[in-house]
Image (cartoon, coloured by chain):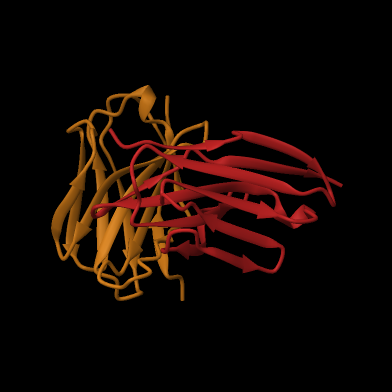
Amino acid sequence: DTAVSQTPKYLVTQMGNDKSIKCEQNLGHDTMYWYKQDSKKFLKIMFSYNNKELIINETVPNRFSPKSPDKAHLNLHINSLELGDSAVYFCASSHRDRVTDTQYFGPGTRLTVL
Amino acid sequence: GQQVMQIPQYQHVQEGEDFTTYCNSSTTLSNIQWYKQRPGGHPVFLIQLVKSGEVKKQKRLTFQFGEAKKNSSLHITATQTTDVGTYFCAGLTGNQFYFGTGTSLTVIP
């Protein structure tokens, strides 16, 4: 019954590898997001998808690519991982055409790059 | 670019003391939301404020939106150990939410 789920919960990998994080929401929301939270707890939005269209892309390296096979999924693929990519990555979803536009966050994926 | 700053970054209080975190935006916001993230957890929505000067209460929590819609505050009365966590504001400008830098609250029993 989890509203927003992410896999894996933990990811430990070597520099230079390529990895993916999966996200699924069962809330019927039309917009999904990826956030990066660093060790100082700063939450930085990376991407958002609305009806399979990218509508926000902050200053994120092009090694990061979001892929949305359908409205309920937004996966994050990372190429050539670097030490600085180590962080907790949160997926979130919301209903953008509602006044409240509350974002529901997944449990997070802790990525460690060695 | 758009920035949303929160102060203080960290706050330690004795259980029973009050706590306030302030959120300031460099631009006018359409609305502002507040989230709480428990240690090891994920951000959870608390409340949204839309109108200039709006004040909302949730039990011991009081939220305010500034008259100019560029700042907001969260005040907790008589903190409890369950209040521990990081509190984020998130302001909406255009079609994008900008999260504040967060305030981490520690409550000493």
- Percent position of residue A66, x then y: 21, 48
Q: Which quarter of the rendering shows the C terminus of chain A?
A: top left
**Depth check: A79 or A74 in front?**
A74
Q: Position of residue A104 (x, y in %)?
A: 42, 63
Measuring from the top left, give residue B58's x and y in whole percent: 64, 68
Image point (58%, 58%), residue name? B63
Q: Against A32, is B59 above or below?
A: below
Residue A113: name its quadrant.
Answer: top left
User: Foreground residue, B13 or A65?
Assistant: B13
- Look at chain B in the picture and name its colour: red
Q: Residue at x 20, y 33 (%)?
A: A63
Q: Judge left or right: residue A93 versus residue B77.
A: left
* Residue A41 sits above or below residue B94 on the image: above
- Closer to us: A39 or B89: B89
Residue B106 drawn above or below residue A23: above
- Quick one: which chain is orange? A
Name which residue lies at 52% across and 59% down.
Answer: B44
Between B34 and A65, the one lying in front of the other is B34
